[in-house]
Amino acid sequence: MTIRTYGDPVLRRVAAPVERIDEGIRETCQRMVEAMIRANGAGLAAPQIGVSQRIIVTDVRGELHVLVNPELVEVSDEVMEGAEGCLSVPGVEATVVRRARVRVRGTGLEGEKVEVEGEGYLARALQHEIDHLNGVLFVDYLTPARRQSLLKEYSRREREEVA
Ligand code: ZN
């Protein structure tokens, strides 16, 4: 399972809602959880494995969430700053401002309604993964100068890894 990286057009597409939870969707979720765990990530969105559908998984402090068609239904006015990275832009991190607390509503794998309330790192992961479903990457929040230097650092690392 390869995780799609920066520059892959699937990461910029707005993912389609899941119409029905069937075997195929459950299999996709399984692959996502495996890829996230193998990469030591705190979260993953379906576009990152090349599937343009609205599914996210998060794994923060041993708490695993699988959410189909997740939606942010409540966000705090309070914001927080913190270091953020992405399995699709491996090896680099940047400070990103996020909402401190969020409530996300979605559907679980048995078709049940699921609601997740997160604060701190879980809130950050949920916002980051939902962004992926809208074709948004964490680097989009940086100033153009900061983004440019981060992406330069990223491609330098990529080249070194290939070499
Ligand atoms: Zn990401």
Image (cartoon, rainbow, N blue to C red):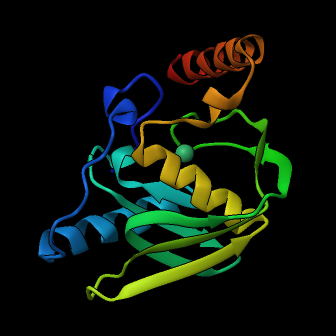
Residue 15 x %, y %: 30, 46
Relative depth, front residue between 69 and 64:
69
| Quadrant of residue 138 within the rendered picture | top right
Q: Which residue is drawn at 19% across and 75% down?
A: 21
Can residue 40 be seen from the camera position used here?
Answer: no
Residue at x 42%, y 42% (from the top left corner): 134
**Observer-nearest residue: 47 or 123?**
123
Position of 29 relative to 127 (above/below): below
Judge whether 159 appears above or below 28 on screen: above
**Regarding ligand 1, which quadrant of the image does it lie in?**
top right
**Residue 140: x %, y % from top left:** 61, 28
The structure residue drawn at horizontal position 32% and vertical position 71%, both measured from the top left corner, is 30
Q: In this view, does 67 lie to the left or right of 93?
A: left
Q: Nearer the viewer, residue 77 or 135?
A: 77
Give the total number of marks visible in the rendering. Answer: 0
| Image-based side of 9 in relation to 158, left or right | left
The structure residue drawn at horizontal position 25% and vertical position 57%, both measured from the top left corner, is 17
- For this view, does 14 lie left or right of residue 38? left
Q: Is residue 31 visible in this depiction of the protein?
A: yes
**Residue 34, how many percent across, how many down?**
41, 66
